[in-house]
Amino acid sequence: MNVCVLGGSGFVGTELVIRLVRAGHWVRVPTRSLARAEQLRVLDTVELSVANVHEPRVLSQLFAGCDAVVNLIGILNPRRGASFDMVHTELAAKVMAAARTAAVRRVLHMSALGADGQAPSRYLRSKAAAEARLRAPPHSEATRAEPGVTSFRPSVIFGPRDTLTNRFAELLRLTAGVLPLARARARFAPICVYDVAEAFLRALGMHASAGEIYELCGPEVMTLEEIVRLTARVARLPCRIVPLPDAIARLQGLVMGVLPGKPFTLDNFRSLSVDAVCRDDGCRRLGIIPQPMLAVLPAYL
Ligand SMILES: NC(=O)c1ccc[n+]([C@@H]2O[C@H](COP(=O)([O-])OP(=O)(O)OC[C@H]3O[C@@H](n4cnc5c(N)ncnc54)[C@H](OP(=O)(O)O)[C@@H]3O)[C@@H](O)[C@H]2O)c1
């Protein structure tokens, strides 16, 4: 297949593009900066380009001749010129419109576990709004066959280059192991990036996955505190967690949210108030046995 992967330069995207290439597909990856996609340059059947994917005309050009489009673009926090609305919701609508124009057969979309119109955080609400835009009927009757849309809702994702275990390991090193932690009891089912990429690859080859939503979880339900402790153990770092009461954690979000790089925001705090655990076993439906953290962490931490 010819596949265009938006967000192909990112943590999940790089893993997926490598797998798509190995499976014999041709892959088109737009990025805002070629330097971000360094790892993909060596792959023969990857066409990298600098492109503004928010421009509908550019999207139509990118999708021309494609059998499938994957949208992995997402942000944890808005930045100047990149709101949740623009990057999640509006982009999803533009992807759908361009996919219709280019007669793309499949659209695979990355959402997040907990995406819901009533969710407490703007991140999760915008992810839900994006999914709704993908499933909204076309404005014009004159469109060709409707692309089959598949959505994925993973819990938190770990693996080499993640911003979860790598960031905690870095913080533990910086603070000699003392870590004040917001929402330490929040529950997750961490899933490995290899399993997430495999889920996309399998869905791409399954006609029956069109119209489906797959929740993706790893085999263990863990609290945030347990994830940090496991990270510390594998990386052989000291670890003393200080769970923060919610009122202080909120304050932490307010203060850190105005620091450069926004290491933690009030919206992140609100996302953490919803457990990221699956109600439906999307991995099983796709024939994937997800790996536990301990099977993967020692290879990169
Ligand atoms: N990582 C997790 O634990 C996790 C959990 C649940 C859901 N997700 C979702 O999974 C997807 C991929 O996550 P990830 O961890 O791989 O993210 P990532 O490493 O930060 O990659 C994000 C990608 O999006 C592109 N991007 C970011 N902001 C953009 C903007 N304003 N305009 C155009 N492109 C932009 C980047 O492209 P360039 O910089 O190359 O232009 C990059 O390829 C996201 O939708 C995320 O919400 C992630």
Image (spheres, helix red, strand yellow):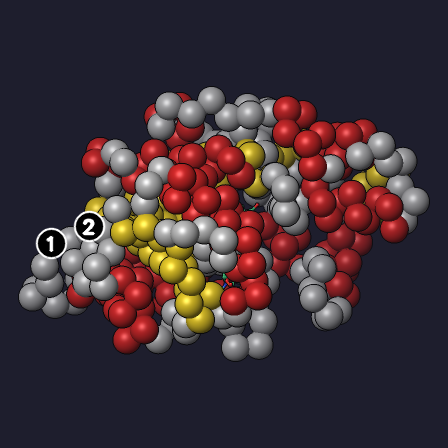
Q: Nearer the viewer, residue 177 or 104?
A: 104
Judge whether 298 appears above or below 29 on screen: above
Element type at marker 2?
A: loop
CB contact under 8 Å: marks 2 and 1: yes
Q: Is residue 159 left or right of residue 177?
A: left
Residue appearing at x 81%, y 49% in the figure: 171
Q: Earlier in the sequence, mark 2 or mark 1?
A: 2
Residue with the most extreme left position: 142
Residue with the most extreme right position: 176
Q: Quadrant of residue 52?
A: bottom left
Mark 2 or 1: the one toward you: 2
Residue appearing at x 19%, y 63% in the figure: 102
Q: Position of residue 250 (x, y in %)?
A: 73, 56
Q: Position of residue 199 (x, y in %)?
A: 40, 35
Residue 24 marker: none
Question: In which quadrant will I find the C terminus?
Answer: top right
Residue 145 marker: 1
Q: Position of residue 145 (x, y in %)?
A: 11, 54
Q: Is residue 227 left or right of residue 4?
A: right
Q: Nearer the viewer, residue 207 or 1?
A: 1
Residue 132 visible to the viewer: no
Q: Position of residue 82 (x, y in %)?
A: 51, 72
Cα–Cα span, label 2 and label 1: 8 Å
- Near mark 2 (Cα within 10 A), the count class, few <14, some 14-19 or many ≥20, is some
The residue identified by callout 2 is: 105
Disc 1 marks a residue whose amino acid type is Ala
